[in-house]
Image (cartoon, helix red, strand yellow):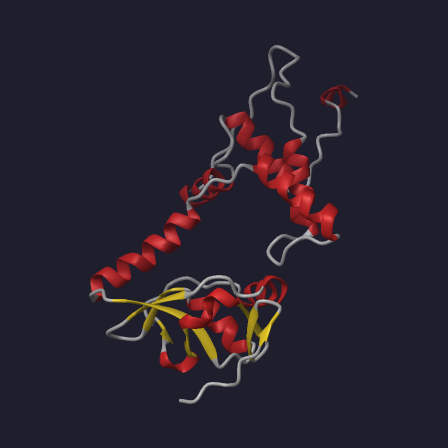
Amino acid sequence: METDTRVNEDGFVRSGMVRFHGDLEKMLAPIDSVQPAPFNYNNGDVEVICESIEMNGMYRPIFVQRSTGYIIAGNHTWLACKALDAHDVPVVMLDVDDVTAKRIMIEDNEAARKAIPDNGLLFGLLSQIKEETGTLLASVTEQDYEVLKALNEIPLETDEFGQWPTFTVKVPPHVLQAFMYLTRQAEDDRGRFELLLRLAGWDGSESASASHH
């Protein structure tokens, strides 16, 4: 398959509506020479990836099992490039068997999913980007930014009342699992509950003494 004409532009290489960082040029291959893996179980946000590519350019290759042509890392990036009419994508071919290909795909997905962010550091980085550019990222909305801001305003030690009331509730196992995952960066149960309230939009401005009125 013949690829489209690629023109260097400010260190980028263009294919369709995609700008690839120039260092990826030697990796470019016809986009239809590889295919998404039929065993990929993730459902990524292709629209957000498209926005990221348009904002930042494409900055990393996709990884493909040589024997099958199946993508084992970067399936949704390929779909985003396809949606942006790219004729080429940067590819790294890996000589791996079928089991190893599936293991790589799962490890890549699950390792990323289990990462625990440092919200303080993330907020600082986003604030710097916002101050310098006036914008955030394709994957970070203003609401996300405000939630991070609220999380970073939680005082390290707020127990000033001695004996506080205890809150208990029975929930199904899947609800508990979701609660533990969403609040995994908290250190204890109280922190988890407060974090969940912050994620729901509570800004902590209401005084604890309000319950007495």
70 is higher (above) or lower (below) than 114: below
Write the residue at 66% across / 42% down.
Answer: 147
From the top left corner, tell me how far across and down residue 200 is, in percent: 64, 42
Extreme bottom residue here?
2
Front-most of 116 and 57? 57
Front-most of 116 and 61? 61
Q: Quadrant of the N terminus?
A: bottom left
**Residue 142 placement, left or right of 85:** right
Write the residue at 54% across / 80% down.
Answer: 85
42 is higher (above) or lower (below) than 37: above
**Residue 100 placement, left or right of 13:** left
Write the residue at 42% across / 50% down.
Answer: 112
124 is higher (above) or lower (below) than 19: above
Query: Hey, which quadrant is residue 202 in on the image?
Result: top right
Write the residue at 48% across / 63% down.
Answer: 44
From the top left corner, tell me how far across and down residue 117 is, in percent: 51, 40
